[in-house]
Amino acid sequence: MPTEAFSNQANDPSQLLFAVCHEISNLVAAIRLQAHLLDEDLDARGLAVASLDIDDLTARTASLLAMVRPMMSPAPESIPPVSAGVIAQGIERALSEYGGRGFEITFNIEPDLPDVTAEPELFHYLMLCHAYGAMEAMEELGERGQIRIEVTSREKEVVFAIEDEAPEDAEHLSWWKASLRGRALESAVTHYILDKRGARFEVRRVGGLNRTELAAPRG
């Protein structure tokens, strides 16, 4: 990330919290609308598709809700080590079901990952939030491609990464100065939460792919 100053809103917890809650309210409204549109005249396939849409919206809402408490609370004074492999397996279980919904999701998880200093549930939901954001970006832009989940260890950290084939988005890549919405909002909130915990967050363009990294210190 460049060393230029953050926009005021990207570093202001009250504005970040307001933006997240606004996004959650929009998703809840979309869930209610989808539920209202469920019609007895739909055939079995139509009902299944509508139900999956509601399930997707609910999962996205849950991942954003998981950000609210960490934003409102100070970082824990100490975080016990936890297996990075366990976190990675949970992420893989949660996302593997999406492979049949128009996206090919692949996983590259290094074996025998070390422990990390991280809150497993928080890291789990942050990763899911960014994966859902990648799916939505590809869907809105008519791109039905591949999303890659990669977990690898380095000398001082374990990197949880998401790579996607969505077209380049200036707001996503320059999230620290962009409007608080969509993927830029997810990035600003993730950086705010992880920075307080000594973890690292980065978004960049690599080889025609968007690469999002959440890195936890080794335990």
Image: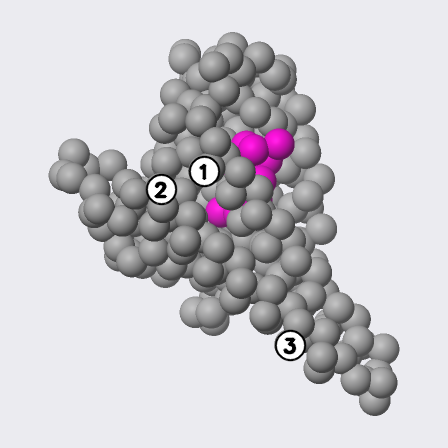
The Cα atoms of the two marked residues, 1 and 3, are separated by 29 Å
Q: Secondary structure at mark 3?
A: helix
Q: Which residue is mark 1?
A: 71
**In the figure, is residue 183 to the left or right of 48?**
left
In screen coordinates, is 81 left or right of 178?
A: right
Q: Amino acid at mark 2?
A: Pro
Tag 1's secondary structure?
A: helix
Mark 2 and mark 1 lie on one chain; the one further toward the N terminus is 2
Q: Look at discs 1 and 3 and give the one toward the viewer.
A: 1
Looking at the image, tell me whether mark 3 or mark 2 is earlier in sequence order. 2
Residue 127 in view of the camera: no
| Region in magenta | 121-130
Is residue 143 in the magenta section? no
Q: Who's the residue at 38% across and 26% down the image?
A: 196
Q: Which circle marks residue 33 in the picture?
A: 3
The tally of labels here is 3
Mark 1 packing: few (<14 Cα in 10 Å), some, or many (20+)? some
Disc 2 marks which residue? 13
CB of mark 2 within 8 Å of CB of mark 1? yes
